Image: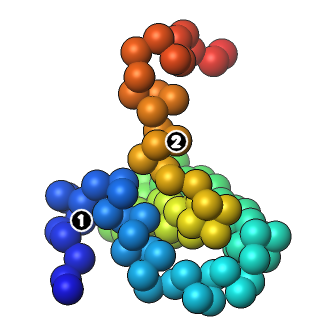
Amino acid sequence: MNPPHAADITIRQFQQLIRDRYHATDSARGVPGTFMWLIEEVGELATALQDCAPERNPSREDRDNLQEEFADVLAWLTTLANIAGIDLSQALTKYTDPGRVEGVKH
């Protein structure tokens, strides 16, 4: 079965795609090891964000790399949710149910 086109994928579908592809390896690595991979990817995202600062006049390659780093962080976060037994669609109701989260952090 082919995965849905990225523009049309739901959080639930993405979580299932990650589970189908990587769950055996991810669950064997466990939460602590997977968390460390997530943090490494967050560091790579931080570097890519710096490289794409407007004053640096980022190249197309820099922007492409930034996009890939966002995808990597999302994939590792989803992996972590899978092995921790968290349904991300359900978790996101924190932000989608009226009145649960109000205001803005400053």
The image shows residue 65, relative to residue 20, as above or below, that is above
Coordinates of residue 80 in the picture (x, y in percent): 63, 65
Which quarter of the figure has residue 103?
top right
* Numbered tag placed on residue 6 in the rendering: 1
Residue at 24%, 60% in the rendered image: 9
Residue at 44%, 85% in the rendered image: 21
Q: Nearer the viewer, residue 69 or 28?
A: 28
Q: Nearer the viewer, residue 103 or 100?
A: 100
Residue 105 appears anywhere in the view = yes
Crowd tier of the residue under label 1, counting other residues whose Cα lies within 10 Å: few below 14, some 14–19, many 20 or above: few
Tell me the mark number nearer the camera, choosing from 2 and 1.
2
Q: Secondary structure at mark 2?
A: helix
Q: How is the image coloured?
A: rainbow
Farthest right residue? 32
Residue at 52%, 17% in the rendered image: 100
Position of residue 69 in the picture relative to residue 105 (left or right): left
The image shows residue 27, relative to residue 49, as above or below, that is below
Q: Earlier in the sequence, mark 2 or mark 1?
A: 1
Coordinates of residue 16 in the picture (x, y in percent): 39, 70
Query: What amino acid is found at the position of numbered circle 1 in the picture?
Result: Ala
Q: Which residue is mark 2?
A: 91
Coordinates of residue 8 in the picture (x, y in percent): 18, 58
